[in-house]
Amino acid sequence: MPRRKLSDLWIVQAPREGAETNDDDFSGVGSSQVPETVENIEIDGGNGRTRKSRGRTTLNELYNLPAGERVKVSRNDVGQPIGAEAGVLGSYLGIVARNHAILPINYESWRQMPNGNKNQALELVKDKFSLEVSDDYLKHALGKKWRDSKSFLKKTYFKKDLTLQEKLQNIPPGIMRHQWEDAVRFWSSTKGEDRERVGVTSRQKQKYTHTAGSKSFCNPRSPA
């Protein structure tokens, strides 16, 4: 089967199933969010055909896959993604979760995020990946990365020593004003402060810390 240098990813060829912002608009996915290089990736070529790409790459090349080609992501016996493809998928899920034009930050929790928004994010992932993992797994992973993104924005831009008005004006680049203002008002509320205290206590009780980089916990035990 013909090969081309992409990054040792398995690639498949398969047809797909049928507000004002502050600074940069994040409606495009991940144009500047490029992680470390990856390798050993399977590409799905359609009609049951797969091929192994060669060399090393970044997600820039994922965006430039020919029409109809997607990275094939396999799973283990408990439904988790495995192999180098899992690392690429994890990085891309993070990019999609930071696309706050699709997944706004002004929902109190992932559970409150409308299903339409979650499904739109899911379609972005399926445009680039041929997946054996379930939609439920992907939505759970997107929710975790969405919460991580909100946590980063709060830690970086929601400064405790600022007045409420200053916090409202301290809008992160690329975040819609109304989203930020809603989030700031919630974080400043009694309910928001109570939730933060619960989160801090929960993190302090956490026994294990994920230090496996872009791989999920199952991957270090899986063959490359």
Image (spheres, rainbow, N blue to C red):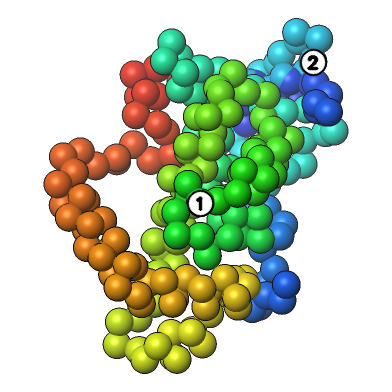
The residue type indicated by label 1 comes to Gln
Q: Residues within 10 Å of mark 1 (few under 14, many from 20)?
A: few
**Picture coordinates of residue 6, whole percent (x, y):** 68, 32
Residue at 21%, 51% in the rendered image: 203
Q: Residues within 10 Å of mark 2 (few under 14, many from 20)?
A: some
User: Where is the N terminus found, in terms of image quarters?
Assistant: top right
Q: Is 213 above or below relative to 177? A: above
Residue at 76%, 10% in the rendered image: 49
Question: Which mark is drawn over residue 112?
Answer: 1
Q: Which residue is mark 2?
A: 46
Question: Which mark is drawn over residue 59?
Answer: none
> Is residue 121 in sight in this rendering?
no
Q: Secondary structure at mark 1?
A: helix
Q: Is 169 above or below relative to 126? A: below
**Picture coordinates of residue 162, whole percent (x, y):** 35, 89
Residue at 32%, 67% in the rendered image: 191
Q: Quadrant of residue 185?
A: bottom left
The residue type indicated by label 2 comes to Gly
Q: Is residue 134 left or right of residue 5?
A: left
Residue nearest the viewer, comparing 67 with 109: 109
Residue at 47%, 37% in the rendered image: 140
Label 1 or label 2, whichever lies nearer to me, is 1
**Picture coordinates of residue 149, whole percent (x, y):** 46, 58
- Answer yes or no: do the residues labelled 1 and 2 have beta carbons within 8 Å? no
The number of numbered badges drawn on the structure is 2
Q: Earlier in the sequence, mark 1 or mark 2?
A: 2
